[in-house]
Every structure is written in structure tokens, then in C-alpha cells.
Image (cartoon, coloured by chain):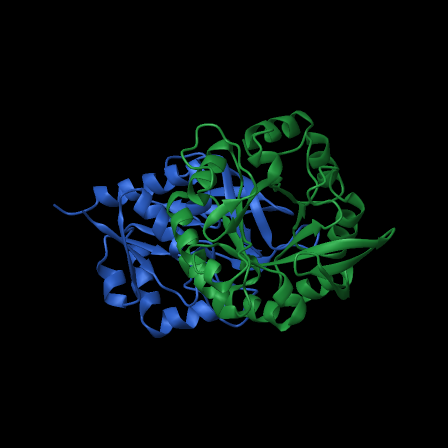
Chain colours: A green, B blue
Amino acid sequence: MLMVRIIPCLDVRDGRVVKGVQFQGLRDAGSPVELAAEYEAQGADEIVILDVSATPEGRGHQVETVQAVRRVLSIPLTVGGGVRVAEDAGSLLEAGADKVGVNTAAVARPQLVTELAERYGAQCTVVAIDARCTAPGTWEVVVRSGQESAGRDVVAWAREAVDRGAGEILLTSWDRDGTRSGYDTALLSAVSKAVPVPVIASGGAATIEHFHQALSAGADAILAASIFHDGDMTVGAVKGALAARGVEVRQ
Amino acid sequence: MSEVLIVRTGTANLASVQAAFERLGAAARMGTEAAAVRDAVAVVLPGVGAFAAALPALEADGLGEALRERIAAGRPTLAVCLGLQLLAEGSEESPGQSGLGVLRGVARRFPETVRVPQLGWNQVRCEAGDGMLGDGAAYFANSYRLIESTPGWRAAWSDHGGEFIAAIERGAVLACQFHPELSGRWGKALLERWWSRAQERVPC
């Protein structure tokens, strides 16, 4: 049986991790390489690097960052941010990413998902969806860091992405992100029932209870950033607590 | 120091495999020539991508024959993910195309009762006997898998909608459905065992 994955997410801008990282014992809390290695040592099952650089120049560091992280990391690495065409994904995979995430560009041009899946395979193709609740049980896709509605229904877009070959959905609740009020479990349940591929829950985690709720709602993996960066909890502590609740994790 | 030859098949992402060997202190080199595959001390057949795309390339360049010879002779060879499926008789992913036929069975898609692709860590359990494989948790990224073992080989099994071949070995030949290069310390230790076995066989 597949184990639940715990995935720390590093937001990287211009080659440096942003969002305050408060680890003890790191020489450089802004280094994606040191952080990725630290999380692997804590028991992370996978690392996600999201490039949030505002400019193409800032994103110029992306390939270098992926290469440097790959040298030290012996768990899977997913990279997202700035992928517009299949060649962008190709250079990230070449640099050492195992999976590539697409978001805004795929909403604007869904054919991108088809191209990635055909060229690199479903297992490399992650579609990230940012969801905003519009009414109970209904969510719309938002893009450009939540500033814009894409005019699409989240469940319908998740289905289309999978039909086009997406092998995984990274689902972020825009309403919950950064609030520490827990995952949007209704959203997770709706999407995980609608698609046959794994669904990664993102946005809102602050407690073990939140992780447990997301998994009960159907998430196959959970992604979190600040809860780990702040040093509130280690990945190992989260896994230990979930195991104590009968959840199967890798320890 | 001897080096490991990584066979470049189509669009496979090889950086993770290469990095894993470099962490072991092994020099890794990419190659596609049949002669190199025949002569190399240690060969890795990686596999990310589609069965249909990878196989014709192997057969056309005479690589398939070179791999079959190596494996028949028990020379150090590691197949990963799609690499394992390429060694089988075929795959549902591309009906009508034959695999290298080293392993018994046809790779079939996971049932619809489970998440496909299988992306994540699964428990691996080994059959009794001596070898490189041990029990542990391994990282998988696949939609197809073999469900029968090959006589004379030692298999390890996992379960995702039923039991399937997680890995299979004979002597210095190891084929893994999971990605040892992405399976943390456990995967690293397995690669180390394969690599040290490969080096034992380096002629003086």
C-alpha cells in the first residue's frame, strides 16, 4: 500500500529561499541546497521547489538551483514556476528535477499539459491548481498568484488536466493559504474523487489535526511550507504523530 | 576507478541516476553505442518515458542485443523503472511491440481501484535467499508493472491494487521497478551493494 507523503515546499526567488526560515544549525537558512538536505534528513518524502521570481532574470538561477539541489538530494524533486513551453520543462528535468509543475501557463494554454505528458510522461507532469471558493461546494481556478480568476471550475479543470495526461494534481486552497486554519477538506474531497491520479493538499496547515483531516478527505500527500520553515514542527515529528494515529508513513 | 555507463534512452531524465552514482564516488558516463554497452564494466538502463519510444531505439542500434548478452552472462547491469519493463516480454502500453524478453511476463496497467500513476513510497518485501535486495520503503513512479516472477531470479514484491514485482535480481543483474536513486538512504545502500559487486568483477 502506498504511504502518505509529507512534502516540504521551498519558495525560491532569485536562487534564494524566501518566506522566513528559522532553522537552528543551518549555516545559511536561505540556501535551497542546505534546506532540501535538512528536510531529507528529517524524513521528507519529496521536495517541491517553487520559483516565485518576479522576472525572467531572477528565474535565470533556476537551473543552477535545481542542479545544486540534485547533487545532494536522494529523494524526488518537483520544480515549478515559469514553465511556459515544453522546452522549459525539459531543461528542468535535464538539470535534475524528477517532476515539473505547471500552473498559470497551463490554464492559459491547456495543450501545454498534453505536450508535457507526451514528451516526458504522466509521471513527470504535475498540474498545480490554485482554488478559490465561490459558494459552498464550488471553487474557481485563480491565476497570477490569486489576483485573477481564470473563469474555470476547479473540478472540471482537474478532470481536463488528467485527461490531457497530468499524473498528479497539486491543489492549493487560495482561501486557506497562509491562514493556518487548516486545509479546505471539502475541496480536497471533491477533487480527489473526481480524478484517478494522486492529489497533493496545500494551503493552511498548522497542526497535526490539519494533516490528518486532509488525508481523511482523500489527499495522497501533504505539502507545507511555513509550519516546517518556522521550526514549529519537524517532518519527523509530523510523521511520528500521524503514525500514532494509524496513518502509514515512511519512517 | 571504473565507471558506470548510463544508457541514454530517448527523453529519459538521467540527472538523478547520475547524481546518485556520483554521490557513491563512481564516475558516470552517458552512452548509446552497443559496443560500449557490451564492454562496460557496469551498465545502467534507466527509464523514464514511454515504452514505445524507448524500445525501437534500443533494437535499432543493436543495444538490445548487447544488453541481452550482458544479462545472459551475468555481467553487472542495473535496470530502473521503465528499464525493468523493457526487459520483459512486452507492455500493454504499446501492444504488438516485443520487449527484450529477458524477464517473463507483460507489463500491465494498475487496476482502476488504485491511484494511477503510482507516485510515492511503497513497502518492498523480498523473497528468501541471498542477494542485493532487502526489505524497505522505495519510491515508485509508474503506471504499468509486472505481476509474475521469472524462474531462476529472486524477486521483491510490493502491493498497489494487488502484488507486483518491485524488483528482481540474478547475480550482478538487478532490475528495479522503483527508483533506487530516489529512495533515500535505503536506495543508496542498495546502489552501493550493486556498485561494489560490479567492482569486484573488474578484472585485475
> Residue at the right extreme?
A136
**Could you say where residue A123 lies in the image, as x and y percent from the top left?**
55, 57
**Could you say where residue A201 lies in the image, as x and y percent from the top left?**
68, 46
Q: Which residue is located at x 57 percent, y 42 percent?
A: A19
Q: Which residue is located at x 61 percent, y 38 percent?
A: A226
Residue B76 falls left or right of residue B166: left
Q: Which residue is located at x 35 percent, y 52 percent?
A: B18
Residue B4 falls left or right of residue A208: left
Depicted A228 relative to depicted A65: above or below = above
Depicted B190 relative to depicted A172: above or below = above
**Could you say where residue A116 lies in the image, as x and y percent from the top left?**
55, 67
Q: Nearer the viewer, residue A117 or A82?
A: A82
**Could you say where residue A214 lies in the image, as x and y percent from the top left?**
72, 40
Q: Can the viewer see residue B127 in this picture? A: no
* Number of marks drawn: 0
Q: Can the viewer see residue A4 in this picture? A: yes
> Residue at the left extreme?
B204
Q: Nearer the viewer, residue A23 or B198?
A: A23
Residue B63 falls left or right of residue A13: left
Q: Quadrant of the C terminus of chain B?
A: top left
Residue A142 falls left or right of residue B79: right
> Residue at the top extreme?
A244
Depicted A113 relative to depicted A219: above or below = below
Q: Nearer the viewer, residue B16 or A211?
A: A211
